[in-house]
Amino acid sequence: MADEPRPGLLDHLLVRGPDVGALAAFYRDVLGGIVTEDALPHWVRVRVANIDLGLHQGVAGGGAQPRFRVPDVAAFRAHLTARGVVIPEGYHAIPGGVELDFADPAGNLLGVVQYGVDVASLD
């Protein structure tokens, strides 16, 4: 077993969509990411929080669904809504906190999580 190859550290999460430029703008302008590689129209690497997302041209959906921690999920929801992001459902209870789902322009699902709160305190 010791000689078998094993995965190393996470390099990035792949997120596909037909318009990489629109994806890059969303992750940069709405989520505050930093573009670290730009090979439009096919590829952009953007760092959001402590995760690198590889934005690649292709059919959206079926991939990873990143979750990001936030200190104030209600404020983050207001931030998304003010930028035209549609929130399809309300908050969801998770053990010890709440999560909020939303999508990028290609329909890839994302979410934010806040611990130490409950749904009743946010509605």
Image (tube, grey):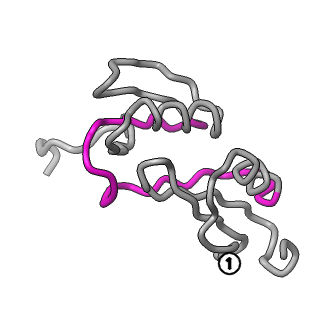
| Residue at x-position 41% and y-position 49% | 106
Q: Is residue 118 left or right of residue 14?
A: right
Measured from the top left, where is residue 80 in percent x and y? 70, 50
Measured from the top left, where is residue 4 in percent x and y? 12, 45
Let me know if residue 90 is in the magenta part.
no
Q: Count numbered badges in the picture.
A: 1
Q: Is residue 94 left or right of residue 122?
A: left
Mark 1 — residue?
93
Within the image, what quadrant is residue 9 found in? Answer: top left
For the C terminus, the image quarter is bottom right
| Residue at x-position 46% and y-position 38% | 23
Secondary structure beneath label 1: strand
| Residue at x-position 84% and y-position 81% | 120
Query: 68 or 61, which lies in front?
Result: 61
Let me know if residue 64 is in the magenta part.
yes
Q: Is residue 19 above or below residue 72?
A: above
Query: 50 or 37, which lies in front?
Result: 37
Measured from the top left, where is residue 33 in percent x and y? 59, 31
Q: Is residue 41 above or below residue 55?
A: above
Measured from the top left, where is residue 24 in percent x and y? 48, 31
| Residue at x-position 52% and y-position 56% | 103
Within the image, what quadrant is residue 49 found in? Answer: top right
Please give the range of residues in magenta.
48-74
Residue type at numbered disc 1 = Ala
Within the image, what quadrant is residue 48 found in? Answer: top right
10 Å crowding of disc 1: few (<14), some (14-19), many (20+): some
Q: Is residue 34 above or below residue 110?
A: above
Question: Residue placed farthest to the front in the image?
Answer: 84
Question: Residue placed farthest to the bottom in the image?
Answer: 120
